[in-house]
Image (tube, helix red, strand yellow):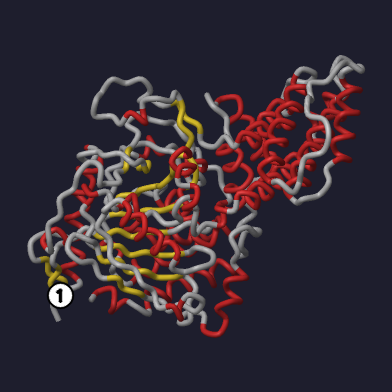
Amino acid sequence: MSVYYIPRKERGKIEWSESESLSVGSFSRELKSNVSQMACYTLGYAYWCQIVHNTCYSSLNKNEEEFVKRRKDIVLKCLETLDIKCSQQVPNIALLGSGGGERAMVGLLGSLDQLGKAGLLDCFLYLCGVSGSTWCMASLYQEPDWTSNLEAVKQEIVQRLSGDGVSWSEAFSKLKKYYYEKDIFSLTDVWAVMVVTSYVKEIDEHTLSERSDQKSKDPYPIYTVIDKRCKQYHEAALCGSALADGDEILKFLWEKIKGFFSPVKSTNVFAEMQKDPGSPHVDIGYQVLMDLVDKNLSVLNGIDPSPYDNAMRANLAELSGGKSQLIFIIGAPNLSDKNAAKWYMKQYTEDVCNNLNALISFWPYDCFMSICKCMAGSIWGRKYNFLYNTTDGSVPSVLQTSEMRDYEDAGLLLNSPFISVLRKEREIDLIISLDFSDGDPFLTVTEAAKKCEERNIPFPRIIPPSEDSKNPKDFYVFDGKGNAPTVIHIPLFNTVNCGDKLEEMRMKYKTFQGSYSEEMINELMELAGKNITNNKEKLVE
């Protein structure tokens, strides 16, 4: 049976104005950012990364236009093979992968594997990801034309994820390189080394800017992040991501920092410093920083941090020979007032680091103190803003007023990259939404609908069956009317692929847990793949 596809823009016309469209800005300068960083909180080169701003750009960048033109030839051939005939032009189809840590990385890989085996992979013009899905994308795009060699690429990724991974000494050396070579060191570097590396089991030295020159035949990749100021402005909209709980992510990262620096005391560097009679008491400085981490954790957990405060003050007094200290905050924080406690710990952490820095300032203490300051100030993905003080009237004023911009995981605002692909110049006709999120399986798509309604962006009406919120099926179609794209939404865990083990699978594959075993990886890829194989006919229809 032949299927005729009517392009979205032929189903109705709608006028767009600059104030109505939520556009997607992009960097147009090369940022030599390491891929393992880009895959955790992806910062961007124009060809590879689209940054969400409430501003308007009238055209796609040249690289994307040329890439899309080449890719459409491949899409057309794939559709013809599937006996899908286009009425006038090739439809623009986007595949979206949500965030979800290693669960999202493995889930996306399993989905792509089955899409390839079903002959559907070349239907997609765009492949767009958030957070964990970008980990998978970064691994795939290491290989030019990975869609033509997916089985081998998949096996290589699975073998790596199942292996021993990066040693502590390698990761420690990488942190040192980031700290001394980066113009601006931030928590993005820390997250890349201490968190993402433990899951993806590699430190990828390639840069996204060098990959932009590849004349690939694969789907056009979009790695999505959010401007921190934009996220703060829409703070109430945090949704769909395990990262959205600010206190939990702080606890998680403080624990990672503590665990990462714990082996330092047994290294040769520490031993050599202790031998030097001219060196300060490095063991005391080390204990001050570890106590500082524990005090932050105690406050976050609502536990009295006084013992750590007393110990730090005593050790700093010993290091300074009894001289006055720079810790101005006296007394315990008000643990019943989270905002007050947060402000207290920000000032306290900065004071301790400034005090200690005046006494000890060499590797790795300088880096450890810098990390603590970044934690206190929540400094993520900081980059120089090349648009600062520009006079080009086409550049929105909001992008010209700050010397630096901070970028974070887009999952903190919306845990699936709907907004990036909905840029009007991309003229998306069909969205396949692969949802690997925790919790509500419809949260990402319903929140996307709300944001689109607020900004007059065409999007289908989303009304999921109420009875499916806890026990979702594996395939939902939300028809687009007029200029709105049709959205197919596929929750990872559902009653079809999990049966009566739905809750068991959710608990087994939590976002923040240790890396998966080979058995778990294969099981999760199979579950994700079933969502494709069980619905191949529906996807083709």
Q: Nearer the viewer, residue 487 or 215?
A: 487
The residue sitting at 76% across, 17% down in the picture is 358
The residue sitting at 24% across, 58% down in the picture is 458
In this view, the residue farthest toward the left is 88
Q: Nearer the viewer, residue 54 or 334?
A: 334
Q: Position of residue 21 (x, y in %)?
A: 26, 46
Question: For mark 1, does the 10 Å Cα neighbourhood hold few (<14), some (14 to 19), or many (20 or more) residues?
Answer: some
Q: Which residue is mark 1?
A: 3
The disc labelled 1 sits on which kind of residue? Val
- Up/down of 119 relative to 195, above or below: below
Is residue 449 rendered to the left or right of residue 371?
Answer: left
The residue sitting at 59% across, 43% down in the picture is 191
In this view, the residue farthest toward the bottom is 500
Tell me the quarter of the image containing the C terminus: bottom left
Q: Quadrant of residue 290?
A: top right
- Up/down of 241 relative to 300, above or below: below
Q: Position of residue 4 (x, y in %)?
A: 12, 72
Tell me the quarter of the image containing the N terminus: bottom left
Q: Nearer the viewer, residue 213 or 492?
A: 492
Q: How many marks?
A: 1
Residue 262 can be seen, yes or no: no
Q: Position of residue 130 (x, y in %)?
A: 44, 52
Q: Position of residue 435 (x, y in %)?
A: 44, 65
Residue 328 can be seen, yes or no: yes
The residue sitting at 61% across, 28% down in the picture is 179
Is residue 424 rendered to the left or right of residue 382?
Answer: left
Q: Secondary structure at mark 1?
A: strand
